[in-house]
Amino acid sequence: MALTSCRTLAETLLEKAVEAENLTNTVPNTFQERITYFHREGIITNEQNEAFYVIRKYGNAAAHDSFRKFYIREALEVWENTYKVVKWFIEVYGSTEIQVPEYDEPAVKATDHEDLSKVLEIIKSLEERLQGGEISSNEGLSDEGLSKAHQVSRVIKCDNEQLEIPFFLRDAFLLPQRFPKSTTFLIRLNGEQQARIMSELPENFEGLHQHVKRFNEKNDATFFEELKEYVKEETIRKKIEEQHPGEMILFYKEDYIILTEALGEVELTIQDFPGSPSFIKQLHEQNITKVNQLPKELVLLGKYKNVGETTLQRLFEQLKLKALEISKEYVTI
């Protein structure tokens, strides 16, 4: 999502500013504390402080609340504040030859999905180049030679095996539900801030289990095997999203469904989705009554009581059948 990408970009720019100010050993490590420090020391103005706050607020919400809907006005607010942060960084730490243009609020057309996709790609590429050291604080930002999302960002090892992590997954949130054999292990590691996002994982899995009690080397190996499958699935998903820019997609493991407007309006009822009455009831209790209110990542629904892989697989197959029925109706019409 563009909101989380803007947050990551802002955090990376602030990190580069810390390096440029020679404050690496002085300022706190968290994004929020660094913003507060820069504001208190007068390195950023009230306007820039507010810009960082807005980006952080919506970026965190987008990353952690899969059921929350975001409005265009919120996205535009984040976009404008991202401009303010980038402008500040370029003017203070960038090349003097770079002229930052005035902010021009984007006019979004209903059918202009490709342009929206390109905007997201640009944000991600800028952030990747900053993290990868391709842009230093005194070199400025250029639109030439952007990194590709599938380029290897880092390598993780376990025993004699290696796993290449692409840039687009470098800061991916590791949902415990995506790792069925290691769910409890990840939840415990999350509590120790060791496996919330990909970048928190160590270069070598040896001894990873030592951060938590009652786990062993076997858990390290199992998690690594599931991580390999996760990277494989996410790589497939990335290519699918690139093939369908601007489309809403529902994912379940390696499979997917394009969420059309018609499919999105289908109501989640016991009659249309038989076999899981308790599950449907729980969704309704959370005001999830239509398909377009389901999370993009269907395994997140596993948090509901007595909802396991069988229930989720059934739901996904029923959604595929609904999509097929709708497509046949349009052909008939």
Image (cartoon, grey):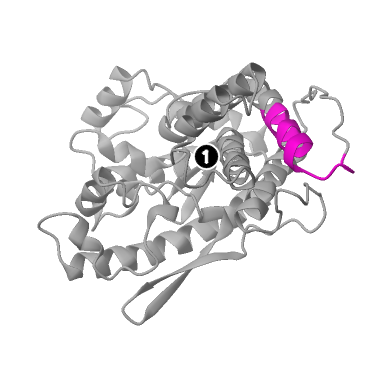
Q: Main SS type for the magenta part? A: helix
Q: Position of residue 103 (x, y in %)?
A: 81, 24
Q: Amino acid at mark 1?
A: Ala
- Viewer-proximal residue among 291 and 98: 98
Q: Quadrant of residue 282?
A: top left
**Residue placed furthest toward the left:** 214
- Residue at 46% x, 27% y is 61
- Residue at image mark 1: 323
Residue occupying the point 20% across, 64% down: 219
Part of the protein shown in magenta: 82-98
Q: Name the spot of residue 39 as percent of width and height, x first.
A: 56, 24
Position of residue 224 relative to residue 129, above or below, is: below
Q: Taking 166 as reference, is 69 above or below it?
A: above
Magenta stretch: residue 96 in it? yes
Residue at image coords 63%, 29%: 43
Which percent across, then down, holds residue 148? Answer: 68, 59
